[in-house]
Image (cartoon, helix red, strand yellow):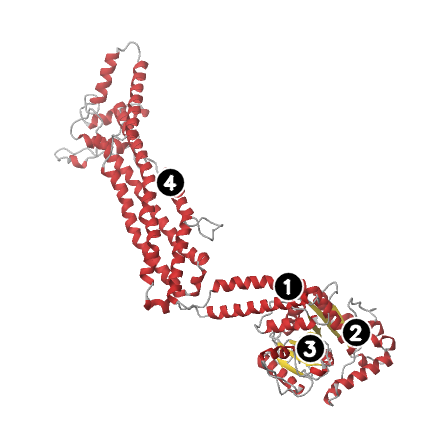
Amino acid sequence: MEALIPVINKLQDVFNTVGADIIQLPQIVVVGTQSSGKSSVLESLVGRDILPRGTGIVTRRPLILQLVHIDSEDCRKTSEENESKKNGRLYRGIDGEEWGKFLHTKSKIYTDFEEIRQEVEAETERISGNNKGISDEPIHLKIFSPHVVNLTLVDLPGITKVPVGDQPKDIELQIKDLIFKYISNPNSIILAVTAANTDMATSEALKVAREFDPDGRRTLAVVTKLDLMDAGTDAMDVLMGRVIPVKLGIIGVVNRSQLDINQKKLVADAARDEYAFLQKKYPSLANRNGTKHLARTLNRLLMHHIRDCLPELKTRINVLASQYQSLLNGYGEPVDDKSSTLLQLITKFAAEYCHTIEGTAKYIETTELCGGARICYIFHETFGRTLESVDPLGGLTTIDVLTAIRNATGPRPALFVPEVSFELLVKRQVKRLEDPSLRCVELVHEEMQRIIQHCSNYSTQELLRFPKLHDAIVEVVTSLLRKRLPVTNEMVHNLVAIELAYINTKHPDFADACGLMNNNIEEQRRNRMRDLPSAVPRDKAVAGGSQSGNVGEQTDGGTGNWRGMLKKGEDGPASDRAMLQHPLPASPQRGHAVNLLDVPVPVSRRLSAREQRDCEVIERLIKSYFLIVRKNIQDSVPKAVMHFLVNHVKDCLQSELVGQLYKAGLLDDLLTESEDMAQRRTEAADMLKALQKASQVIAEIRETHLW
């Protein structure tokens, strides 16, 4: 099981190469207040002075410290270097049995630990500045030594309350956010450091640990500065867990004082002094406290924690590998044959455009109608309902009908309803079908324009790699649609014009309607005759009706002019007066000529039975013929739109794209990738390799029965 920690270190190295922290690896996170002794604890575990020391805030960036135990006999070679033997090369020139490596300095080897400390300080100031500010960008340091146990630790800035120097006012929140980022990782072990000369009940380290680990299953407490407690007091109750119990335990340690550090006291000497202090002050607890016991405990806890985390870690790695593989597929491969690539992209776009219209596209929209489905909806729902809502007699009044009948008869009274009035009025009504038909063409054109964006977003993501090619394709398709729009509009206009060109009164449906109408009129006439009083001879009634119907308009009560007609209307009952009133002209003065053209002809009377019958006949004929034409238009317009617009674009799209874009002089320009696409592809490929390598590492664990 001891080999599990190096495996995690190897995984950490794998993800460090791509600079990613998407995998939350098991690690020990050290938290505590400022000057609580965190750095001293870490140096005790390393056995060397490697961290900046001083007063105030010293640790200003996360330090991810990997301790790698190596055999004394092979102290000059790390596991990576042993692997490099296979390639016939070795790192040479390493003097000493311990050394360190930083991630940001690549392969540079540090054998002087004072130089390591200086590099930590320099790298901290490089990112965080020299004004005591902090940064969340970590420093990665790996220490190889035969005197350490395998551990991965994270040293974080100490919790502070009051900003000093040029620190921002919210420095406390910044530090806590940084701490929360690391301890919120469920795969981490929290090492809560508290000084023994402070009240354990007020420990900030334990407080923040409990926020993310309320059960205490991954929190270990460390009590530092046991030798600095007030005279007459000890930490026995604290170390025994009687003050605040901690599930994973409480371990006390003795750090080097600042004087010891200034006098260059060795960590090994400090360890001996610590052991002597514990034996003298806490003899019953000496074997359960101290730096060595802390190192062994951390090693054991980390191994068990890694073992528990590996199944979930393996699943997470596999899921991410699948996601990055899909992402890399979306970015596409680097272009080698530009000519072939351009032709493939054009062909694929044209095919996806046609498939979207036909309803066979790979990516089916589920939130709204799209492509051919929306075109069908436009034809049969939007256009169909709009035509059905057009009133056959809309905008046509009885006076309009009567006026048309009179105008069609000329100066002579008509014995029959003139056909010219019917044609005149029915053409006026049929003309109203043109605007909805042209609007139908416009809606289909808009939908075919929307299909371009749909194909770009869902069907051909490769186009996103080449923004200039995408824009060029959009322009070509838009231009093709724009050219077909007037042609289609002209055809739809002609369909209505065709209906207006010849009013086919012999149409079978219209003839049937006329026959039925005549039967109804004859039936009404017989009913009126049957309702006449028996004292009136029917032949007289017929004659009277004919006279009233044919002559009454011209000779009204012996007056013989329109004034008598008006007077009769005024003298009659209110129910017999006309519904439409026109103002009468003033009586001309004697001696003045009257311009008859300026005198409006009034119709201020109730329509006669003949007039009512004639208007009803015309209105019924108009409605009957209008319904026939509307049915024709409702059927022919979608067919025209499909033929002249939709199908034509489908059939000509690929040839149009090839003709406009597939040219040698345009290849380099059209296949120029966006600025960040190549970088994103490289990053995705590197991450995928890292995930695949991590998966192999975990597979090796299973094969060696470490898991």
* Res 384 label: 4
Residue 67 marker: 3
What kind of residue is marked 2? Ile
Please state the horizontal and vertical placement of residue 183, each as a whole percent of the image. 68, 68
Where is mark 2, residue-wise? 251
State whether residue 650 is above or below residue 419.
below
Q: Residues within 10 Å of mark 4 (few under 14, many from 20)?
A: many
Q: Earlier in the sequence, mark 1 or mark 4?
A: 1
Residue type at mark 4? Gly
| Residue on which disc 1 sits | 314
Q: Is residue 323 left or right of residue 424?
A: right
Q: Secondary structure at mark 2?
A: strand
Q: CA distance from mark 1 to mark 2?
A: 33 Å
The answer to which of 689 and 281 lies nearer the viewer is 689
Q: Residue at x 23, y 13 (%)?
A: 540
Q: Position of residue 27 (x, y in %)?
A: 68, 71
Label whose residue precedes the other's in the sequence (3 or 2): 3
Q: CA distance from mark 1 to mark 4?
A: 58 Å
Left or right placement of residue 409 versus residue 473 in this view: left
Q: What is the CA distance from the residue labelled 3 to the residue labelled 4?
A: 77 Å
Give the number of the mark in front: 3 or 1: 1
Q: Decide: few, some or many residues near mark 2? Use Cα within 10 Å; few <14, some 14-19, many ≥20.
A: many
Circle 1 or circle 4, nearest the eye: 1
In this rendering, position of residue 116 left or right of residue 573: right
Contact? badges 3 and 4 (CB < 8 Å): no
Q: Quadrant of the N terminus?
A: bottom right
Residue type at mark 3? Leu
